[in-house]
Amino acid sequence: MADWRLAVDIGGTFTDVVLLDTQSGRVVVDKTLTTPAAPLEGVRAGVTQLLSKAQVTPADITAPIVHATTLITNALIEGRTGRAGLVTTVGFGDTLLIRDEHRYDMYDLQIEFPDPPIGRDLTFEIDERTSATGAVLAEPSAADLDRLCSQLSGAAVESVAVCLLNSYVNPANEQAVAEYLRDRLGVPVCISAEISPQIREYPRMITAACNAATMPVIGPYLDELQRWLSAEGFGGAVLMMLSNGGVVSADDAARGPIRLVESGPAAGALAGTWYAHRLGSDRLLCFDMGGTTAKACLIEDGEPALTNTFEVARIYRFKKGSGFPVSVPSVDLVEIGAGGGSLARLDRFGLLKVGPESAGADPGPASYGRGGTTAAVTDADVVLGLLDPGAFLGGDMPLDAAAASAATARQAQGLGLSPVDTAAGIHEVVNQNMAAAARMHGVEQGVDLRGVTILAFGGAGPVHACGVADLLESDRVIFPVNASVLSAFGTLVSPVRIDLARSMPRLLESVDIAERDGLLDELRGEGRRVLSAAGVPAADVRFRYGLDARYSGQGNEITVWVGTGEAWPASEAGVRSAFESEYRRIYGMTIPDVAIEAVTWRLSAYAEKVQVRPDTGATGEAGAAEPVSRRPVVFARGSAAVEVPVYRRQDLGVGATFGGPAIVEERETTTVIRPGWEAEVASDGSLVATRRPSG
């Protein structure tokens, strides 16, 4: 009997949908244009097409439907958030404007920061105070609460964030304010003690503010989605992909949408992890290029690294500190505005730049024929011959080659180049941008990426992967089956998981065991509640423990994980050893005779990963790799077009080999094997490209 699983991933340009039967391994995929103004329309169209293609009815899908999305990060980047209010302690109303007083560029006199998601005009103060030890020194009065409620009501807010001083130690005042506002305003209210109960006022406040500002974005969408699924007869609940690579219930996601800020990219990283284990490779660089952005994530020792702070909505793509540092666990990756829809332009010096601005799904690149006039990466790839306009999405969405040529010709006039050389320049610049971002990601991880195997996916990833690999001096690129929708597939192999944290600064030797265990009991209780809401039986819940620690007197911490179990698993000596080992790995030294301070205690509640074995469709019969056609392709500026063989992916059996240059087409993407590379179909159906030895 079939056991169908459905996954949905809303990207900036395309919405990807995947069906997997866990019994037979059958996989059916589809793509449709994202509808930014009404996301459900794109989801509805994609799911309906997919079910028809697979000849599956909604009632056949009884397992949870897993969903990844870029709605939250796009809302914050574009400033298209809800009208949210912020409540804070008297005297702290300017915190979002003061930030942390860090200048990401010391010598820039016109330094810019993104506008806060909640402006000063919608920030309100209330007279209350909790001490640093958690003692409530002043409760908010009934009169102040009435006044606050009137102010928020008069401002017509759609949601509210409450972030009071020292609430991470004792949330009583935050809870009292939130309960009062929920009863009288009838809008979603979140408190910082639930979203980010950690020290440091600005990160805690900006995290709560971003959460409140996106609650009016995700809440109505999830409500509408679940109503449609129920009306259609789907039997499965909705699980939402989190930035940390786990999934939770839709209700929990609606309460904490900031945890979804890197939902889509995290799904891609989890798919990369699944492939790393499957291929027996401990080290891969996931390269995910879609229509709007490109992501790079290093899989080391079979797992992606996690970070406890993620910066969103940066003013400058490579300048840490120019965005919002939200305190949510996230897969550690780098994401830049470099996708098929990224627009070409000339800067004030007359130099060619590509992105981060994107044509998105509406109007899309000029070749989409939806009103776009500026040359985008997809247009350049059409002009170069890398993409067949008639084969885009299997011919269901043919591209306008004339519009692509016209847009590229307009860009060429400002450069004094031919349209073809301009297209080659756009292709080269976007490859350089992505390679530079990947190198920076490697540097931040302390890793030299030269020679690392690249796993290429996303709609545009296989077109550009060999070019990026050339720049990174990588000798091997893997193009998995269904590469275009691999992030959606990643949601199907993600565990149900929530990462929780709470600050309780104590010197390691002074930790009160009863106090620590009480804190962990509360975190375990919240973890069990979240996993239960996602359908996980209590007996299947597992816990992992860690803490952020530093040498006493330092201003920053490092995270160490100390084990798993139903209780705190490490002794004081064990924690000290784990801290010193990690500190030495990062800094090359330890500091003797200085006390260690535990600052924030962490707990990860999770269930085991889903085990799936998709049918790759590989025939096992190599035969000769016979092209179905040939077409002229330009690979570099100043080079003439060369006739390149074009293969159909479904015609290539296991063991089939061919040399580059070559094009491999499938419905959802095109794989480009550049000159100097050779390709072979692996036993799992993946297409593996290897650089020929020089000479």
Image (cartoon, helix red, strand yellow):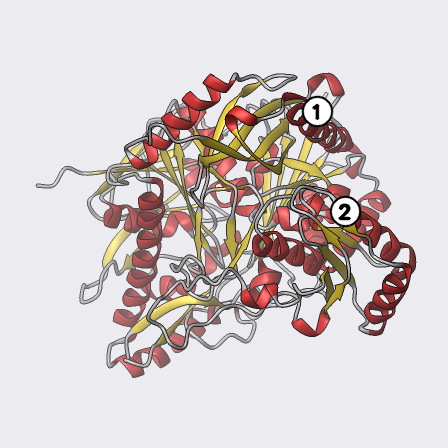
Percent position of residue 478, x then y = 36, 36
What mark, if any, has residue 136 been given in the picture?
2
On screen, residue 394 versus residue 444, left or right, reads right
Give the quadrant of the C terminus. top left
Q: Amino acid at mark 1?
A: Ala
On screen, residue 251 versus residue 54, left or right, reads right
| Residue 71 visible in the current orientation | no
- Tell me where residue 193 sits by quadrant: top right
- Which is more N-terminal, label 1 or label 2? 1
Q: Residue at x 45, y 59 (%)?
A: 321
Q: Is residue 228 above or below residue 592?
A: below
What mark, if any, has residue 92 been given in the picture?
none
Does dot 1 land on a helix, a strand or a loop? loop
What mark, if any, has residue 2 been given in the picture?
1
Q: Amino acid at mark 2?
A: Val
- Tell me where residue 425 sits by quadrant: bottom left
Q: Is residue 552 above or below residue 94?
A: above
Q: Residue at x 46, y 72 (%)?
A: 112
- Tell me where residue 421 sits by quadrant: bottom left
| Residue 218 visible in the current orientation | yes
Percent position of residue 217, x then y = 71, 59
